[in-house]
């Protein structure tokens, strides 16, 4: 099975020598190929170049091959969404009204809303229904150009329900063409029954949840909500150390609500990414420089909760890489539309279109441990890409924030729409 895409107006993020990530000034550059072609064999990109298509490629076409004429259209690598809570039961629009009336995120949580509300709903919902709801969301984000997504647990808050979410994620991996990375987030919030006994809950996460998750091989990564009003640096340190014993590398929530020390504890444990980062100062930037940890910003949550925006320009100017992800969840970012995240990166964070595209492709792939196979158009990488509708240039992608610019979606070397 092979696919030839020809007459491509411009191939975006085309790499002869694939990069692990892009940082600092380099984020403002993206290599493109105008008037190009891409040849896909099986689930991999075999080659690409400038038109006309070489004879040796044409000779490989047979009755099982398909040819797509992309005249007037561009080709982008699929978006890599490195932070979501996509498996959840039902919506939380009532809290949205509370927020409009002036209640803060923390006030809503104290009233039994927020994460605790989602945990109760999930407890009352069976696996089959959770799979059905999540598949709808996966299909939606796929049509907006997402080809790889991280999905966290975290709405269980007890052993049984955390395992239930992770098993649902495992089922989704077998059903969806979207590449899914599972993350265990047992320490997302403190259950109501552990109020005043937070240390006991942390003990339970360490002694019961982590071993059971590891025994079934349900998660690649471990996460903790390390922030004011949630889990302390000391508690986070203990949980991450316990996860490391079972081979789960950290990807943690940090500094969304305050200068919590979450970034520092994440770097200490060689976190693959530290996420949110609204409260990031000089000390945090200095801590991140020269590390293997990807700063991952979640514009949807900051926008929806009307929070301060992470100092992305300062981070990039200091030489850091930045990834952008959707934080798709029912309470603080009820959208997984990465085209909108791309636009937010430019509008609210003053990123150039090239910087924003790097943030949602190659750097997002790195933040999931997928950069060797995803995040750019390169020979040997998995053929996860989309052909746009006719658009004038790559800057139009973030500019036209209200419309879906993705046309044909190709995942794992197959057209899926």
Image: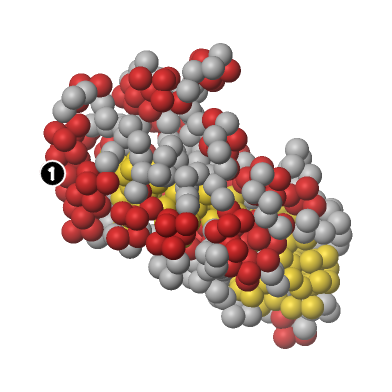
Position of residue 401 relative to residue 106, above or below, is: below
Q: Which residue is mark 1?
A: 207
Quadrant assignment, res 375: bottom right
Callout 1: SS: helix
Q: Is residue 147 left or right of residue 188?
A: right
Q: Nearer the viewer, residue 231 or 63?
A: 231
Q: x and y percent of residue 39 in the render?
A: 68, 72
Q: Which residue is rendered at x = 71% and y = 45% of the image?
A: 347
Q: From where the camera sits, is residue 410 visible?
A: no
Q: Nearer the viewer, residue 328 or 213?
A: 328
Q: Is residue 320 left or right of residue 119?
A: right
> In what quadrant of the picture does the N terminus appear?
bottom right
Q: Is residue 225 left or right of residue 336?
A: left
Q: Which residue is rendered at x = 84% and y = 53% of the image?
A: 390
Q: Which residue is rendered at x = 58% and y = 67% of the image?
A: 24
Q: Residues within 10 Å of mark 1 (few under 14, many from 20)?
A: few
Q: Which residue is rendered at x = 55% and y = 65% of the image?
A: 318
Position of residue 387 relative to residue 186, above or below, is: below
Q: x and y percent of residue 184 in the render?
A: 31, 45
């Amino acid at each position: 099975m092979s696919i030839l895409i020809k007459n491509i107006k411009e191939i975006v993020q085309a790499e002869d020598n694939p990069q692990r990530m892009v940082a600092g000034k380099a984020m403002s550059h993206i290599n493109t190929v105008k008037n190009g072609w891409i040849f896909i064999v099986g689930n991999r990109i075999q080659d690409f170049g400038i038109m006309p298509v070489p004879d040796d490629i044409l000779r490989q076409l047979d009755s099982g091959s398909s040819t797509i004429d992309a005249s007037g259209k561009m080709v982008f690598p699929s978006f890599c969404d490195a932070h979501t809570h996509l498996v959840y039961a039902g919506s939380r629009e009532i809290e949205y009204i509370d927020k409009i009336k002036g209640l803060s995120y923390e006030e809503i949580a104290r009233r039994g809303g927020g994460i605790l509300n989602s945990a109760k709903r999930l407890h009352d919902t069976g696996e089959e229904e959770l799979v059905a709801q999540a598949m709808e969301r996966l299909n939606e984000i796929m049509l907006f150009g997402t080809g790889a997504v991280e999905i966290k647990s975290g709405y269980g808050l007890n052993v049984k329900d955390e395992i239930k979410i992770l098993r649902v994620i495992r089922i989704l991996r077998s059903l969806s063409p979207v590449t899914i990375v599972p993350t265990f987030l047992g320490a997302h919030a403190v259950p109501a029954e552990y109020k005043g006994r937070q240390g006991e809950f942390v003990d339970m996460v360490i002694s019961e949840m982590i071993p059971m998750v590891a025994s079934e091989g349900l998660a690649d990564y471990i996460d903790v909500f390390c922030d004011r009003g949630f889990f302390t640096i000391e508690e986070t340190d203990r949980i991450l150390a316990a996860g490391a014993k079972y081979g789960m590398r950290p990807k943690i929530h940090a500094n969304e609500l305050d200068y919590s020390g979450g970034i520092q504890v994440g770097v200490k444990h060689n976190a693959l990414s530290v996420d949110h980062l609204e409260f990031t100062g000089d000390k945090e930037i200095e801590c991140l420089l020269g590390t293997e940890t990807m700063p991952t910003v979640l514009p949807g949550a900051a926008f929806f909760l009307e929070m301060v925006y992470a100092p992305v320009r300062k981070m990039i100017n200091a030489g850091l890489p930045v990834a952008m992800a959707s934080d798709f969840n029912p309470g603080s970012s009820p959208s997984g539309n990465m085209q909108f995240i791309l636009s937010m990166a430019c509008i609210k964070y003053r990123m150039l279109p090239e910087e924003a595209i790097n943030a949602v492709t190659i750097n997002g792939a790195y933040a999931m441990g997928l950069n060797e196979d995803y995040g750019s158009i390169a020979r040997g990488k998995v053929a996860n890409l989309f052909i746009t509708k006719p658009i004038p240039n790559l800057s139009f992608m973030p500019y036209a924030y209200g419309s879906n610019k993705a046309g044909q979606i190709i995942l794992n070397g197959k057209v899926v729409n």
